[in-house]
């Protein structure tokens, strides 16, 4: 766990460096993709950049507190599990009741000028709930599965989350929330026959959905958006046009045409298209490489975590962060249909930015706890008491702090 990772002394340093690098790139890209829209909406071209920086500051506080001053095990108790589930349901219900309608969907609650997207919080809630419930059963050697109660309790709660999000309506995020919980069960090690069953059910659902003519038409339009470039295929054709116009090294910074009201959601879901237009193929490869290295660092921590709850927390965070990043880039390039997911740190989105940093803070907390465990085991094996090691201070029976 404490061994050298690529260019860094350890995977923790790699995660922190890449997070900061991606946020710097995000600041530049959010400003470039949004200043035209911000000027037209508010008269201040820096509007979205200022808000991005504000949310980054809040996210940074969550990251610092969670990663360096909180033992993740405190968040995985049964009591906290119930609190997380109840709070998420209440926030999703409040969104339906008093949320603001934007583009036909009621997804945001505005508080003191800031927006809160409860569906983004539901994603991190799913990870915490699954790590707490399934991790505890893994530690105790208990059976669990998708059809076995009470081991499918988190799955049923996530289905409630997905149902409330679907009513906003936001089918894409509802699907992601439920699929994320299914992924947590797969990571926890459900029987292979249940995984095969999930694949079969998914195939049947897609097949039944294709029976409806309008859904078939949507799929055909996704496969070939150029059939209706001014209608249903407009957003995808504009995205592909922006990406293609970037060429090898991109257009001069700030001069990409996509932001001039040609590409909808240029600073949010389709921020990657603007990035490709202004940084080209080389820039896109560099950004993808950053995500690949970040995934490798997260996988290294997950693979070396002995505590089953900590393992699920890191593995679930990896699935959440890297999975959404891959889905966004696939969506923007037309590999996947438009599903409305932001690109990690590159897209503008306040709640998503905070939850992303909180998830990475959880990973750092698991890493520090595992390093503390390794050091104590090494000292015990050497016949030395842990309190004589100045690098490690035992704070309580289950909480450690170490200045790495």
Image (tube, helix red, strand yellow):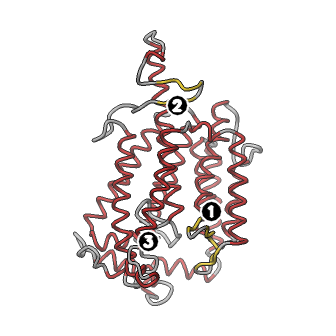
Does residue 17 sit above or below 345 in this rendering? above
Image location (x, y in percent) of residue 16: 38, 46
Q: Is residue 396 left or right of residue 277?
A: right
Q: Secondary structure at mark 1?
A: helix
Q: Earlier in the sequence, mark 1 or mark 3?
A: 3
- State how far apart marks 1 and 3 are (Cα): 20 Å
Does residue 243 sit above or below 403 in this rendering? below
Give me the residue at 29% from left, 76% from top: 254
Determine whether label 2 and label 3 are within 8 Å by CB. Answer: no
Tell me if I can see residue 237 in this picture: no
Give me the residue at 59% from left, 56% from top: 123
- State how far apart marks 2 and 1 are (Cα): 32 Å
Image location (x, y in percent) of residue 200: 63, 58
Question: Which residue in the structure is indicated by mark 2?
Answer: 306
Give me the residue at 43% from left, 87% from top: 229
Q: Quadrant of residue 199?
A: bottom right
Q: Earlier in the sequence, mark 2 or mark 1?
A: 1
Position of the N terminus by quadrant: top left
Does residue 28 sit above or below 398 in this rendering? below
Furthest residue toward right: 149
- State how far apart marks 2 and 3 are (Cα): 42 Å
Image location (x, y in percent) of residue 355: 53, 55
Give me the residue at 39% from left, 33% from top: 404
Mark 2 nearby-residue class (10 Å; few <14, some 14–19, many ≥20): some
Furthest residue toward front: 112
Q: Which label was assigned to residue 118?
A: 1
Determine whether label 2 and label 1 are within 8 Å by CB. Answer: no
């Amino acid at each position: 766990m404490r061994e050298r990772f690529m260019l860094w002394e350890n995977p923790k340093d790699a995660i922190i460096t890449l997070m900061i690098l991606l946020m710097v790139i995000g600041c530049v890209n959010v400003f470039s993709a949004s200043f035209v829209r911000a000027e037209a909406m508010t008269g201040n071209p820096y509007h979205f950049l200022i808000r991005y920086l504000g949310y980054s500051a809040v996210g940074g506080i969550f990251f610092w507190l969670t990663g360096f001053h909180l033992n993740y095990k405190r968040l995985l108790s049964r009591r906290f599990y119930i609190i997380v589930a109840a709070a998420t349901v209440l926030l999703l219900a409040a969104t339906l009741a008093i949320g603001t309608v934007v583009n036909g969907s009621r997804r945001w609650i505005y508080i003191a000028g800031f927006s809160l997207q409860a569906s983004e919080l539901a994603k991190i809630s799913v990870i915490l709930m699954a790590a707490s419930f399934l991790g505890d059963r893994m530690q105790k050697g208990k059976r669990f599965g998708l059809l076995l109660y009470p081991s499918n309790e988190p799955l049923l709660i996530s289905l409630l989350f997905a149902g409330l999000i679907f009513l906003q309506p936001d089918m894409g995020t509802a699907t992601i929330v439920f699929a994320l919980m299914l992924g947590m069960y797969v990571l926890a090690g459900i029987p292979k026959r249940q995984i095969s069953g999930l694949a079969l059910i998914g195939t049947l659902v897609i097949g039944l959905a294709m029976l409806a003519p309008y859904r078939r038409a949507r799929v055909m339009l996704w496969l070939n958006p150029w059939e209706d470039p001014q209608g249903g295929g407009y957003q995808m054709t504009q995205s592909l046009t922006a990406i293609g116009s970037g060429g090898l090294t991109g257009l001069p910074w700030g001069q990409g045409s996509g932001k001039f009201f040609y590409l909808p959601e240029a600073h949010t879901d389709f921020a990657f298209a603007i990035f490709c237009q202004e940084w080209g193929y080389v820039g896109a490869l560099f950004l993808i490489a950053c995500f690949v290295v970040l995934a490798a660092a997260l996988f290294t921590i997950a693979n070396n975590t002995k505590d089953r709850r900590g393992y699920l927390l890191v593995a679930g965070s990896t699935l959440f962060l890297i999975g959404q990043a891959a889905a966004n880039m696939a969506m923007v390039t037309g590999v996947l249909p438009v599903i409305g997911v932001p690109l990690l740190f590159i897209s503008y989105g306040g709640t998503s930015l905070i939850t992303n940093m909180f998830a990475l803070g959880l990973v750092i907390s698991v890493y520090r706890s595992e390093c503390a465990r390794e050091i104590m085991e090494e000292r015990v094996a050497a016949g030395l008491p842990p309190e004589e090691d100045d690098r490690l201070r035992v704070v309580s029976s289950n909480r450690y702090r170490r200045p790495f």
